[in-house]
Image (cartoon, grey):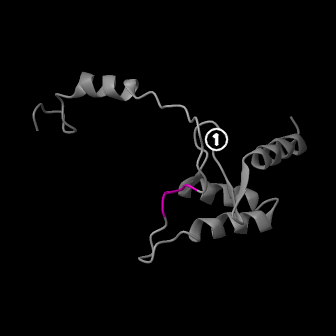
Amino acid sequence: MTDGQILGKIKDLYRRNHRLVEGHSYTIPSADTYPYQWFWDSCFAAITLSYFDLRRAKAELRSLVSRQFENGMIPHIIYWQHVDNLPQLDMRWGKRRYQQHHATSVFGRSGQ
């Protein structure tokens, strides 16, 4: 795959995951499972976008800080719009893992 083909695929992905709600432009990590604006993902999206769309990279960060709290905190997730029918996450793996190791603390001793 050539550099041009890779860049084309990256641009296509960012085009498909772009959202514009109430004048706020942002990139979602995944339409299927993460349809909101996430702090961490938006920061990395802005870095990537800055290589081929500086205007959109700046808009990504502006959307993020537009919901900054009065105390300075920027929320981890911004729910710009309601999304119906999100799949439920399968938590069984974590529950099984916890049950297998519940007697051992982080220090490797039971009950502490």
Q: Which residues are magenta?
A: 75-79
**On-image quarter of the C terminus:** top left
Above or below for 21 versus 5:
below
Above or below for 53 versus 18:
below
Q: Is residue 51 left or right of residue 64?
A: right
Q: Residue furthest left?
A: 111
| The one of 101 and 69 positioned closer to us in this rendering | 69
Which residue is rendered at x = 81% and y = 48% of the image? 11
Measured from the top left, where is residue 91 in percent x and y?
40, 29
Measured from the top left, where is residue 27 in percent x and y?
68, 53
Asked whether residue 2 is drawn in magenta, I would say: no
Residue type at the position of mark 1: Ser
Measured from the top left, where is residue 4 in percent x and y?
89, 45
Quadrant position of residue 16: top right
Task: Classify mark 1: residues with Cα within 10 Å, few (<14), some (14-19) or many (20+).
Answer: few
Q: Is residue 64 left or right of residue 74?
A: right
Q: Is residue 109 left or right of residue 64?
A: left
Q: How many marks?
A: 1
Quadrant position of residue 106: top left
Above or below for 4 versus 102:
below
Above or below for 97 versus 50:
above
| Mark 1 lies on residue | 30
**On-image quarter of the N terminus:** top right
Asked whether residue 78 is drawn in magenta, I would say: yes
